[in-house]
Structure formats: structure tokens, C-alpha cells
Image (cartoon, rainbow, N blue to C red):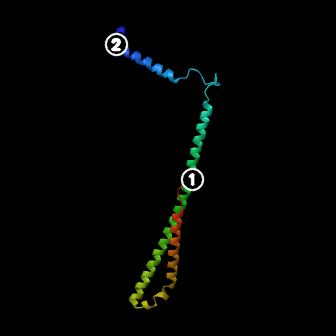
Amino acid sequence: MADFLEDSRPEKKEDAQEGQDRFAEDIPEDPTPGDAGKPPDFTGKLNEVAQKSFSVLKTSVDQVTHFAAGAKKMGELKLELHHLKSDRDKLLRTIGLRTWRLYQDGALATLAEKFAPEFERLEALEKRIVETEQRVQAVSLKK
């Protein structure tokens, strides 16, 4: 029965021998001159790979650190911007209510002098909002 199996698979033996021959071609028969008897320098190669990996990791950490610092700064500026706009909106509501009351009382002729402090505060808030928006745009998240 063993003969039957061997006879029915002659191409498998030839394929196996051919594979071994190809594998043998990949292995150098003689070591390179000067390396006779020395094992391959795996330590040096591992050290080189480790150095490259460390360099890539350090660059990545630097980029992430820079991004995080920029994102923090941007978050702080956007929070400040939110507070400034909220203050502006409250002031505009106050001005609106007072203007409405003056309209109802028929006293709109004195509008500028009655609202001078609010208008000055509103102009200052508008200026700070523009400045803060410019600072937000200036923050870079890329290194």
C-alpha cells in the first residue's frame, strides 16, 4: 500500500526537491570576506532599528505636544471670546430695553447722551472681540 502512495505522487517529490533547490540558492555558501566565523551583527541592526524608532517616536511626541499646546490655547481664546460675546449680547439687550422705554416716553432726542457709557462699553467689547478672533486664527495646531 505504501508503494501505491509513492507511485501516485511522483510530482510532489519533484516539487519538494525543486523548492529545496530554490531555498539553497538564497543561502550564500561562503561568508563574505572578513566575516569568516563571525555571527551576523544582529545587535548592530537592532540598535539601528531602535534608534530610528526612537527618532520617529520623539518626532511624533513633539508634534502631539505642540498640537495639544495649540489646542489648549485655542480653547482658552474661544472661551474668552464666548464670554466677550455674551457680555456684548447682555449689553445690547440692556440698550434695547432702555431705548424702547425712551421711545415709549417720547424721549429719543436725548439718546446719545443717555447711552454714552453703554455705547463706549459696547465699542470696547467689539474691539476686544475682533482682537480675540484674530488671536484664535493665529494659533497654529501644526508644527
Task: Pinpoint residue 92: horizontal percent, then vertical percent.
Answer: 45, 78
Q: Secondary structure at mark 1?
A: helix
Residue 115 position in % (x across, y down): 48, 85
Q: In what element is the residue under mark 2?
A: helix
Nearer-N-terminus badge (1/2): 2
Residue placed at 50% from the left, 71% from the top? 130
Instruction: Give amino acid for label 1.
Output: Thr
Quarter holding residue 18: top left
Tell me: residue 71, above or below residue 100. above
Residue 34 left/right relative to 57: right
- Disc 1 packing (10 Å; few <14; some 14–19; many ≥20): some
- Amino acid type of the residue that numbered disc 2 sits on in the rendered structure: Ser
Is 107 rendered above or below residue 66? below
Find disc 1 in the rendering and name its residue: 65
Tell me where residue 14 appears, x and y as whole percent: 41, 16
The picture places residue 105, in percent across and down from the top left corner, at: 40, 90
Q: Quadrant of residue 108?
A: bottom left
What residue is shown at x 53% (from left), y 63% (from top)?
138
Quarter of the image that includes the N terminus: top left
Disc 2 packing (10 Å; few <14; some 14–19; many ≥20): few
Are circles 1 and 2 on residues that touch, CB within 8 Å? no
Name which residue lies at 63% across and 24% down.
Answer: 33
Residue at the spot of label 2: 8
* Residue 17 numbered mark, or none: none
